Amino acid sequence: MYRNSDDISISLLSGSDLERKKHDIIDFLATGDLRIDDQVTTFVVALSQDNERIVACAGLDKNVVKCVCVDKQLRGSGLSVRLGTEVIMQGLSKGYDDLFLFTKYINSRIFDGWGFKSLVEIPNVVSFMDYDSTQLEYYLDTLKSTLRAGERIGSIVMNANPFTNGHRYLVEQASKECDWVHVFLVREDVSFFSYDTRLTLVRDGVSDLRNVVVHEGSDYIISHATFPQYFLKKDEEITEQASAIDALMFRKYIAPSLNINIRYVGTEPTDKTTAMYNVVLKKFLEDCSYSDKKIELKEIERVKFQDIAVSASRVRSLIQENRYRETADLVPKSTYLYLNKFFVNEKEERKSCHEN
Amino acid sequence: MKINKRGIAGTLESSDVMVVINPHDSQEIKLIVQSKVEKQFGSSIRKTVKDTLTKCGVLSAVVDVRDQGALDCVIRARVEAAVYRASDEKTVKFGDLS
């Protein structure tokens, strides 16, 4: 039917154009047993020139390629490569240094043809691939420059939104038990507190602990790419597969760069996503069927204040309820000083303005 | 020519090459080549890319080359196009370079 792929034109859809065509895309994806992903903001669509029917599509959600499907009759025609070129051009021109995708293990060869390489995989289940692995090498090189010698090298990955007594307690415990502790801050800037603020507060909050090193996060450690659900926080059950990828990335690339052999997490009493993540993390950091060195996962009981676990979400809700002063019992002095400066004073100023 | 921003040229299709040029923080060319025909033509591809960059007067850049078996003339054309897109050069003088 379409033996010549020149009869097919490729176009980009986003914004209102995408909304208009959304139903066609949903119908087309269904023919490949795929569902549309609402996080996708740009679709590359291949249309047959005679009847404007969709014959292939691929979506971009920031730096993650999703919803890739090619009409069954056109597979092997070279259309996939044209689609891939456009997707990569789009992603790279938007300024992303590396592009990622999740794919069923059996389909990963298609993306080899796009120049993607597998970073980690759950054999026979899912592969996590990226386009330019030199970016990961740069990040690992930066980490390696802070390599510390020791027997027990601990690690903690945190979002610290903002840094609380809970985080502080976890770091302290690790600091006592280990020769060195590497703390990684989630890089993604989608939280209530900005990345820069979170980083400053973590650095200030652990500055007295001599064996703690704070690292900047990246696309390769709890990011939009390695662990998308972390940032969605929906109640729906997160899949083991997706969160396993983040655990495997840590085990295969991050941990060996710094000789990390223990990862610390706080017990999670409320948030479902984090609780599930802890379970999956334990399984995939310690699973013996992977050749990468095992990482011990240590869960530390959450510190409590007045019988309720101290958490960043509790601090944020106090802020949202204008109960800033009460956060004093939940956060270290450095964090409180910051909150005081930006929220308490601001509010009092506003109040006095009204009074005037 | 000075590389000020990312420049991309080419495609993933057979007999073509995809070239991505980025600014580099040191005065050197960092060249990464991946090719289907690496074993037979890897060094020849590297030479063609480096020669083209020299002709364009590029002294500092990170260059990512994904080759699908492109001929030398195609490699030169794609590298030139990527360089122009990565620099603020407005007037294109393709003929002068080859």
Image (cartoon, rainbow, N blue to C red):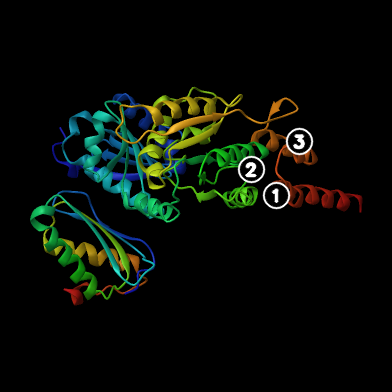
Q: Residues within 10 Å of mark 3 (few under 14, many from 20)?
A: few
Q: Is residue A230 left or right of residue A37?
A: right
Q: Where residue A125 appears, x then y in whole percent? A: 30, 26
- Figure label count: 3
Q: Which residue is mark 2?
A: A163
Disc 3 residue type (three-letter): Glu
Return the mark for residue A321: 3
Residue lying at the far right of the rendered structure: A356
The answer to which of B1 and A254 lies nearer the viewer is A254
Q: Please, which chain is the residue tagged with disc 2 on? A: A
Q: Residues within 10 Å of mark 1 (few under 14, many from 20)?
A: some
Looking at the rendered structure, the secondary structure element under dot 1 is helix
Q: Quadrant of residue A162?
A: top right
Residue lying at the far left of the rendered structure: B40
Disc 2 residue type (three-letter): Phe
Q: Which residue is mark 1?
A: A334
Q: Residue at x 70, y 44 (%)?
A: A332
Q: Please, which chain is the residue tagged with disc 1 on? A: A
Q: Where residue A351 appears, x then y in whole percent? A: 86, 48
The answer to which of A48 and A210 lies nearer the viewer is A210
Residue A290 at least partly seen: yes
Q: Earlier in the sequence, mark 2 or mark 1?
A: 2
Q: Are marks 1 and 3 in contact (CB under 8 Å)?
A: no
How far is disc 1 from disc 3 in space, using C-alphas? 21 Å
